[in-house]
Image (cartoon, rainbow, N blue to C red):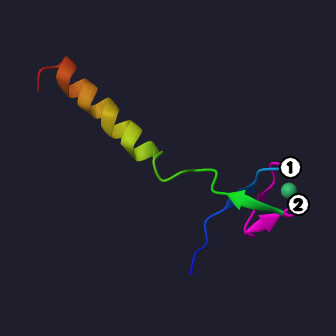
Amino acid sequence: MAKSILKCIKCGSYTLKDKHCEKETINPKPAKYSPEDKYQDYRMKYKKLHNL
Ligand SMILES: [Zn+2]
């Protein structure tokens, strides 16, 4: 089971643990953000520009 990397909100360290510095860690890359989506957006703009 692959576990995504987490970030400590207190010290900013990356960890695989659920807690760090006695605080809960967060996922530094929310599911909303994806470089793939950005690329798709670029492609859409490219298509529009060239009337494809
Ligand atoms: Zn920490």
* Residue 16: quadrant of the picture: bottom right
Task: Residue 21 in the image: state x and y as whole percent.
Answer: 88, 60
The residue that appears at 61% across and 65% down in the rendered structure is 4
State yes or no: discs 2 and 1 in contact (Cβ < 8 Å).
yes
Left or right, 8 with reference to 46: right
The residue that appears at 17% across and 19% down in the rendered structure is 50
Q: Secondary structure at mark 1?
A: loop
Instruction: Classify mark 2 as within 8 Å of ligand 1 or not, answering yes or no.
Output: yes
Task: Residue 38 in the image: state x and y as whole percent.
Answer: 40, 37
* Residue 19: quadrant of the picture: bottom right
Single out the residue that lies furthest toward the left: 52
The residue that appears at 86% across and 64% down in the rendered structure is 22
Q: Residue 50 versus residue 45: which sits nearer the camera?
A: 45
Instruction: Classify mark 1 as within 8 Å of ligand 1 or not, answering yes or no.
Output: yes
Q: Which mark is residue 41?
A: none
> Which residue is tagged 1?
11
Task: State the predominant SS element of the stretch in magenta.
Answer: loop
Q: Which residues are magenta?
A: 11-22
The verdict on residue 27 being magenta is no
What type is the residue that disc 2 sits on?
A: Cys
Q: Which mark is residue 21?
A: 2
What type is the residue that disc 1 sits on?
A: Cys
